Amino acid sequence: MPGLPAIQLIDAKAFSYTGAPIFLKKLFQPIFPRNAIAISGDYIAAVRMGPRPPHPVESWAYVPLPAGVVSASHSKTNIVDSEALHRALTQTVQRTGLSGKEVNLLIPDLSARVLLLSLESLPGKSSDLLELLRFKVKKNLPFSVEEASLSYHVQTLGASHLEVILTVINKSVLREYEGAVESLGLEPGFVTVEHFGITQLLELQAQDWRSRSTLLFRLAPRFFTTSIHHHGFLRFYRTVEKDYSLDQASSLTPESLFDEIYPSLAYFQDKFQNKIEMIYMSGLPTGSERIYAAIQRLADCPVAEVRTERAGATGSGRVNGDQMNQMFAPMIGLELGAS
């Protein structure tokens, strides 16, 4: 996918066993599936994209989930009520009319860990690098490193400065989400956390964002995620659990949102002696211009919104703008980015 490290996609089959970079599979699988499913704590959503540019949204559907059916976590059981989830998945897939067997699957950011690890040099073999990463990360996981599946991307920041973007997920958690989709006779060919779909949407909306120090903030049901890119490299990633649902969006205030963003701004300025030059936000409802303007004043830098239509997504008039930008944006970003 253009402009994004391979780590941002987890291969549902190779990921658990080899840790192989996903672009290797892409070379041998040039046709990216045009079906995508997102499993959230509040809903199930799916899209079917058109096969030809500009890849319009041909159909879409979502089904709300009762509280407690899915509870995203790094280490605990995520799918609490598998029967209720299966019913919701079945309804969503039927309403969307997904064609083909393979689908892209997006899971909550809280289900996986994304870590940044500095290295002085790389081992000669990928297997040795994986062992080194396991050793470095084992004290930072809420579960045994033996239970972890790892995938990585190496960033070369300088002649002797290497940094690894490491995505870690508990094998049993990954299997929960895979199994839920497989129970419908579908194959989760690619699995990724939702924030990476939003990152790809930003890539399509603002091609120059990597030349700046950019903060991307996404508000999602039950959590928010912040990432910072500096000179084109991912330098910060943070997901925080929050008691929030989509129907509470009207109660958000600029001050409460800035309180969530400020620690990331302060960390970046302290560590890199630079200010954030641009903030992009996703997941807020239509009509949040007042909030963006207030955060722009508080952060003293421009603030813009990541939206699907600005990245070239088109669809039928039946599509509600807020639903597209809150529920469907990660899937659409993933799909359009694979074009």
Image (cartoon, grey):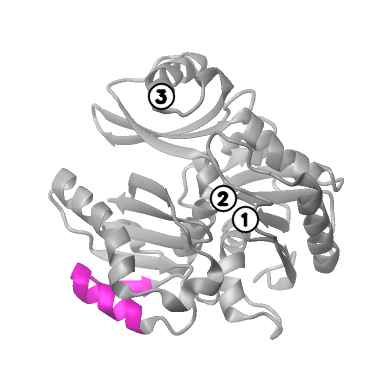
Please tell me whether mark 2 sits on a helix, a strand or a loop.
loop
Viewer-closest of 224 and 273: 224
Residue 221, compared with residue 15, is above or below; it is below
The residue to which callout 1 is attached is 40
Please tell me whether mark 1 sits on a helix, a strand or a loop.
loop
Viewer-closest of 284 and 249: 249
Mark 3 Cα within 10 Å, few/some/many (few <14, many 20+)? some
Residue 123, compared with residue 174, is above or below; it is above
The residue to which callout 3 is attached is 137
Separation of residues labelled 1 and 3 (CA atoms): 27 Å
Asked if disc 3 and disc 2 are in contact, CB closer than 8 Å, the reply is: no
Residue visible at 33% across and 77% down? Answer: 292
Snapshot quadrant of residue 80? top right
Residue visible at 34% across and 78% down? Answer: 291
Asked if disc 2 and disc 1 are in contact, CB closer than 8 Å, the reply is: yes
Which of the two discs, 1 and 3, sits closer to the camera?
1
Mark 1 Cα within 10 Å, few/some/many (few <14, many 20+)? many
- Image: magenta residue range: 290-304
Q: Can residue 255 be seen in this view?
A: yes
Question: Residue 32, image x and y in percent?
Answer: 70, 51
Residue 107 as seen in the image, left or right of residue 74:
right
First of labels 2, 1 by sequence position: 1
The residue to which callout 2 is attached is 108
The C terminus lies in quadrant: bottom right
Q: What residue type is labelled 3?
A: Val
